[in-house]
Amino acid sequence: MGTGDKIRKDTDGIIIRINLKKNEWIPILSKALVQKTISEVHDAAHLGYKKTLKRLRSSFYWQGMYADVLRYISACWKCQSSFKGKQYTALPQNIEKEGIWQTLAMDFCGPFKIDEEGTINYVLVVIDMFTKFMEAIPTGSMSTDETIRALSLLFNRYGIP
């Protein structure tokens, strides 16, 4: 509740919250009516929690509105089954794989904290796309110099692709 709010009963016995700054009043719902009210507002269009909460707040008030609306929508089967979430694009599958040790893919993993002193290290992961053979090389950073050092070790061991 805001600092300029008061709570009182109106002539019908309904408890209302009055915002003195905006000169508006909003009925305070009893806990018995909360679920039914959320259901009525949300199920009409299966809006997300922000829009459902906005519509409810324009007409009603009760303690814990945000948590109640979020809990209701999280349990709504229709919303959860149609929610797409963040869309991820698939990795390209058309990489030419000519032969062993001809096409390599590489990326860094990390940072990893290795000791009590807080040393941060990374791992350069290199994969042969033909055989799926993987090599993981620890590095101190993701700098160009460290990458060249790690790849030199790898190419000295297995040859240059």
Image (cartoon, helix red, strand yellow):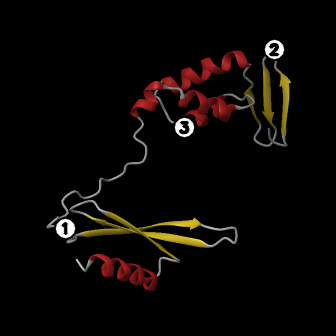
Q: Earlier in the sequence, mark 2 or mark 3?
A: 2
Residue, disc 3: 51
Q: Is residue 103 left or right of residue 57?
A: left
Instruction: Determine whether 151 is above or below 9 in the image.
Output: below
Q: Which mark is residue 13?
A: 2
The mark closer to the camera, 1 or 3, is 1
Which residue is at a point 50% across and 70% down the rendered structure image?
A: 122
Earlier residue among tags 1 and 2: 2
Is 77 located above or below residue 119 in the figure? Answer: above
Q: Is residue 127 above or below residue 41?
A: below
Q: Please, what is the three-letter code of the amino acid marked with disc 2?
A: Gly
Q: Residue at x 81, y 14 (%)?
A: 13
Q: Quadrant of the N terminus?
A: top right
The residue that disc 1 covers is 100
Mark 3 is surrounded, within 10 Å at the Cα level, by few (under 14), some (14 to 19) or many (20 or more) other residues, namely few
Q: Amino acid at mark 3?
A: Lys
Q: Which residue does the image show at 55% across and 72% down from the upper left?
A: 121
- Rendering quarter of residue 154: bottom left
State the SS at label 2.
loop
Q: Residues within 10 Å of mark 2 (few under 14, many from 20)?
A: few
Horizontal and vertical percent position of residue 27: 73, 25
| Mark 1 / mark 3, whichever is N-terminal | 3
Q: Residue at position x 65%, y 29% from top?
A: 68
Residue 91 location in percent, x, y?
29, 57
Q: Position of residue 66 (x, y in %)?
A: 66, 35
**35, 26: nearer the viewer:** 35
Q: How far is the residue under mark 1 from the one under mark 3?
A: 55 Å
Which of 82 and 34 lies nearest the eye of the viewer?
A: 82
Q: Looking at the picture, how far across and down is residue 6, in whole percent?
A: 85, 33
Name the kind of residue labelled 1 in the image. Ile
Marks 2 & 3, CB-CB < 8 Å contact: no
